[in-house]
Image (cartoon, grey):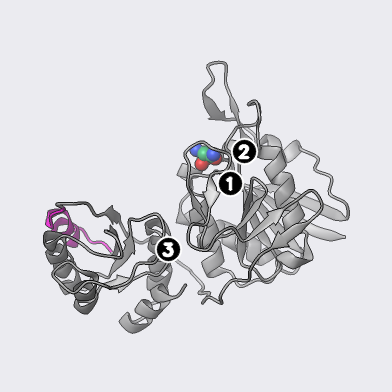
Amino acid sequence: MKKILVLHTGGTISMHEDQDGDVETGLNNPLIDVKMAIPNVDLTVESIFNLPSEHIGPEHMLQLQRRILAAENEFDGVVITHGTDTLEETSFFLDSTLSVDFPIVMTGAMRSSNELGSDGLYNYHSALRVASHENSRNRGVLVVMNDEIHAARFVTKTHTTNVATFGSPISGTMGLLTKRQIIFFYDLPKRLVLPVAHVQKSIPVLKAYAGMDGQLLELLATANIDGMVIEALGAGNLSKEAATGVHYLLSRNIPVVIVSRSFNGVAEPVYDYLGGGVQLERDGVIFATSINGQKARLKLLIGLDNQLNNHDLHDYLHQL
Ligand SMILES: NC(=O)C[C@H](N)C(=O)O
């Protein structure tokens, strides 16, 4: 018998449509009363929050992380239901800070509980199947939706409303659920897991654009921020003016992390001119490999909480 801990946090999977067709959160999470029968699986169900995922932040992620750590010796796996808007961030935070070998599987839904074609119960069932499967161990945090398994490290929400919203543009889908099987296509490269104690850091994320000036960056340098992430152009480049703004931030010892605003691919220094990635890196900018802005923000937060020196912070964010 496998013992699985289920932590419900809210999100569309637990919401319902009202008479006007608007989607809202109820007083209690209806998933608590759902009897999900999986052979040889014993469920312990807790409603840790009942929040839309836009109301979930690093403090909630830390609370979830601590609950999972406390469950380590008691359970064989954990399933978390969560709103999809920030699911990739919670899954990434847990993946980056937890080194447990049991499966941690997150899921959600795109259609609420009383909508036609609601995908919530199906995804919940799928997540339980994956969490109780022997091959799911030692794979970090997994995201299961729409018959697919994704690694927290690479998954992102790709569509505003489609039930097939989650994708892993860089790595591809990690696995599949069929009626009878759970199939994994690849193992992940090893990553460094770091503990985290405090999550109150001010780390804004800015998106670069053609004609971006340095004014906002210079303003931010005086706003007591701990670091900043820029979703840069292409492989990791900025306008000349933005590069000057970045230089100003770096001269005040504010770490600046670069990712790409492109949906797919790895950010790395390629171009050697003002604003090009090579010169940005020479100036002290950190390139985060293979993650998007919202994940780079969490990674910088964790690195800073561990008081990594400049060299180690570079290495940490470079890692896949
Ligand atoms: N599909 C969803 O779950 C979206 C919802 N707004 C949430 O993230 O809570």
- Mark 3 CB within 8 Å of ligand 1: no
Q: Which of marks 3 and 1 is in front?
A: 3
The tag on residue 82 is: 1
Q: In which quarter of the image is residue 64?
A: bottom right
Task: Choose between 239 and 132: the one closer to the eye.
Answer: 239
Residue 142 in picture, x, y percent from top left: 62, 59
Q: Residues within 10 Å of mark 2 (few under 14, many from 20)?
A: many
Residue 295 falls left or right of residue 84: left
Q: Please tell me the numbered disc located at residue 177.
A: none
Q: Residue at 78%, 66% (x, y): give it.
A: 134
Q: Position of residue 261 (x, y in %)?
A: 33, 56
User: Would you say the beta carbon of the disc 2 residue lies within 8 angstroms of ligand 1?
Assistant: yes
Q: Which amino acid does label 3 sit on?
A: Ile
Q: Name the residue under label 3.
A: 291
Residue 76: image x %, image y %? Answer: 76, 64
Choose the circle earlier in sequence order: 1 or 2.
Answer: 2
Q: Is the Cβ of the residue at disc 1 closer than 8 Å to that at disc 2?
A: yes
SS state under label 3: loop
Beta carbon at label 1 within 8 Å of ligand 1: yes
- Which residue does the image show at 88% across and 55% down from the upper left? 40
Span highlighted in magenta in the image:
212-225
Q: In this view, does 110 lie to the left or right of 291?
A: right
Three-letter code for the amino acid on which mark 1 is drawn: His
How far apart are labels 3 and 2 at the CA level? 26 Å
Instruction: Describe residue 176's horizontal placement relative to residue 92 as left or right.
Output: right
User: Could you give the CA–CA distance between mark 1 and mark 2, rounded to whole angstroms?
Assistant: 7 Å
Observer-nearest of 252 and 205: 205
- The amino acid type, in three-letter code, at marker 2 is Ile
Name the quarter where the N terminus is drawn.
bottom right
In the picture of the structure, the residue carrying the numbered disc 2 is: 13
